[in-house]
Image: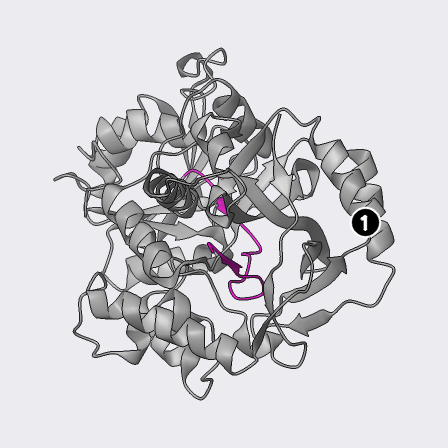
Amino acid sequence: MAIFKPFKAYRPTSNKAKDVAAYPYDVVNSDEAREIVKGNPDSFLRVGKPEVDLDPNISLYDAKVYAKGKENLTRLVNDGILVEDATPCYYVYSLTMNGRTQNGLVGCASVEDYWNDVIKKHEYTRKQKEQDRCEHVRITNAHTGPIFLTYKDDRDINNLINKVKQNAPNNDHVANDGIRHQTWLIDKKEDIEFIQNRLAEVPSFYVADGHHRSAAAAIVGRERREANPNHTGNENYNRFLAVLFPASELYIMDYNRLVVDLNGNSVSEFLDKVAEKFTVVKSVTKVAPSKKGEFGFYAEGNWYKLNIKPELVDLNDPVESLDVALLQKHVLDNLLAIEDPRTDDRIDFVGGIRGLDELVRRVDSGEMKAAISMFPTSIEELMNIADAGRVMPPKSTWFEPKLRDGLFVHFLG
């Protein structure tokens, strides 16, 4: 059964929470991060993306980058901007976007659960990104960004969270992107024991977002265990920072594709080949797919609606029936010779939060030749694949809203 423990978080004081809270390290690039932190010395991007305080030409993997992250984190603690709670607690973290709220339970998941697949994954990790996050954890000695976990709803825990939310939050701010972030403390002994007892009956957690960070936490936790002759299992490095959301509250957006070229084909030649596997209909409006098996295609100022032919979909295979897998097999690989979208520089990915206008902009600018809009993967599909011990194709899910780094920090000891 899954383990999820309370802990003594370092949290920003209520008057500093908005200044501190920051996008995760992989949501903005270095240039965007440098703009965001201007005039804000307390932004947690200075911890998650510490290259913002160094020469722009420095390698992201230079030892100075990780050292600067540790320095910036230490300053936030020493200056009293991040303050440790006196006793182990759970926390409620609510995010509201466009009038829709999702409520997460903040605590610490188990490193051993990660290795034993009690915490289920649905993506492969990339070695370089994994090593980068490992080094960040090693040097800062902290989990600075929470892993986004989900589980099948527990009505009693949901009811407790709603009860806690009747109290005034200890942090309540609206970020510059319009998303509201609220947090509450769960420090009553009876509530903590109730949550622990209920979660002890949960068979599995699922990594929704944060595969590289969870892998790094597990790797460093194992390193610390092997290096400690007096290991007991109770050390902080045996657990990692996570926010646990009920599956019914999650929102997965589309994760769209852009391609640099059509592999030597003109648009009309390409669409003729696509028509062997899809129905192709020109559209007078932008195409936001409304169902599984439907895709939008944009090139040379025109939109087309593509629908995969039903006989090509194996409904008995949870991976091969995914829209992202069908697109990969029948279009990206077969027609465009993009065999590995994780490494091929002829393809790029755009989260649905940026909208279809971003696809149009990048194609019309000449940067990209064409765009493909997608129907979102469902949380049920994600869970089914993880339960089957399978993995999704790269860039299958885009969760919104994004959790903010800096609202909770967990030190390894």
Q: In the picture, residue 219 is in which quadrant? A: top left
> For the point 48% across and 17% down, which residue is it?
388
Q: Is residue 153 above or below residue 386?
A: below
How many other residues sit within 10 Å of disc 1, few (<14), some (14-19) or many (≥20)?
few
Q: How many marks?
A: 1
Image check: 403 left or right of 106? left
**Image position of 159 (left or right of 83):** right
Element under disc 1: helix
Q: Which quadrant is the N terminus positioned in?
A: top right
Tell me which residue sits at (83%, 68%) in the image. 168
- Residue 375 seen in this snapshot: no
**Residue 267: % across, % down:** 24, 42
Q: Amino acid at mark 1?
A: Lys
Residue 330: image location, x then y, percent: 30, 25
Above or below, 410 against 233 in this view is below
Asked if residue 313 is among those painted magenta in the image, a careful observer would answer no
Q: Which residue is found at the position 35% from the left and 69% from the top?
A: 69
- Residue 22 in view in this figure: yes
- What percent of the width, then of the height, locates residue 210? 45, 46
Q: Which residue is at a point 83% across and 36% down the rendered structure image? A: 156
Q: Is residue 91 above or below residue 78?
A: above
For residue 301, side relative to residue 105 (left or right): left
The residue furthest left is 264
Color encoding of the figure: one colour
Q: Which residues are magenta?
A: 396-413
Rendering quarter of residue 88: bottom right
Q: Nearer the viewer, residue 412 or 163?
A: 412
* On screen, residue 64 above or below 16: above
Q: In the depicted view, which residue is nearer to us: 248 or 228?
A: 228
Residue 182 in the image: x percent, y percent?
70, 64
How would you classify the magenta stretch by its main secondary structure?
loop
Question: Mark 1 sits on what residue?
Answer: 189
